[in-house]
Image (cartoon, helix red, strand yellow):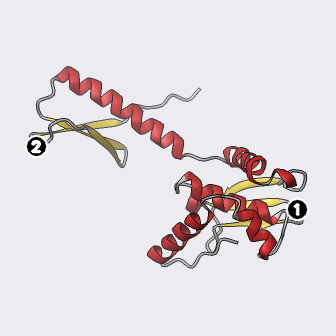
Amino acid sequence: MARTRKPVVEVRRSQRRRRTVSAYRDGERVVVLIPDRFSRAEETEWVERMLARLAAREERVQRTDDELLARARRLTSRYLPDYADQVQPASVRWVTNQNGRWGSCTPDDGTIRISHRIQEMPDWVIDYVLLHELSHLVVPSHNADFWELVNRFGKAERARGYLEGISAATGLVLADD
């Protein structure tokens, strides 16, 4: 069983800071910002609390292939229940070799690949990209029937706008097919 090492913690006290406490990771170190008036006991309590919050946030962000497959199943049952027999991907996984698209689907063998570039994006954006690819298992092309399936997702247009904004801001030319 692997033991998790406690990170090096740097506590920074501020006279201007009155009530708020915050923390962030700086490489291997965690910086905790606290009001100067805190006692040592309050400092210890808040350092532990902020380490727990950081760990919980980082755990939420780590997304695995298994979680992605479970997410695909949930999306299928919610948005494509009438196609549940067709929408059974052979695999759904994160990949690092997609530089020109957010995701891809090969309907012939039922494989779906999602770009690692979206792993830390909001859940609703990941859901949109994944539903887009799942819809290709029903309709391989981008015709009206395909978009009818994708647009069952209430935030589809918002997610497309988000991805277009990311593409524009980063200079990447990425497609969502």
Q: Does residue 160 show up?
A: yes
What label does residue 109 carry, if any? 1
Residue found at x 46% / y 74%: 170
Q: Is residue 91 left or right of residue 62?
A: right
Q: Is residue 94 left or right of residue 49?
A: right
Q: Is residue 68 above or below residue 53?
A: below
At label 2, the amino acid type is: Arg
Q: Secondary structure at mark 2?
A: loop
Q: Position of residue 63 (x, y in %)?
A: 60, 47
Pick whichever, 59 or 82, lies toward us. Answer: 82
Density class for disc 1 (Cα within 10 Å; few <14, some 14-19, many ≥20) is: few
What label does residue 16 carry, if any? 2
N-terminal of the two: label 2 or label 1? 2
Which quadrant of the rendered structure holds the C terminus? bottom right
Residue found at x 52% / y 46%: 61
Q: Quadrant of residue 67?
A: top right
Q: Position of residue 59 (x, y in %)?
A: 52, 40
Q: Is residue 56 left or right of residue 149?
A: left
At label 1, the amino acid type is: Asp
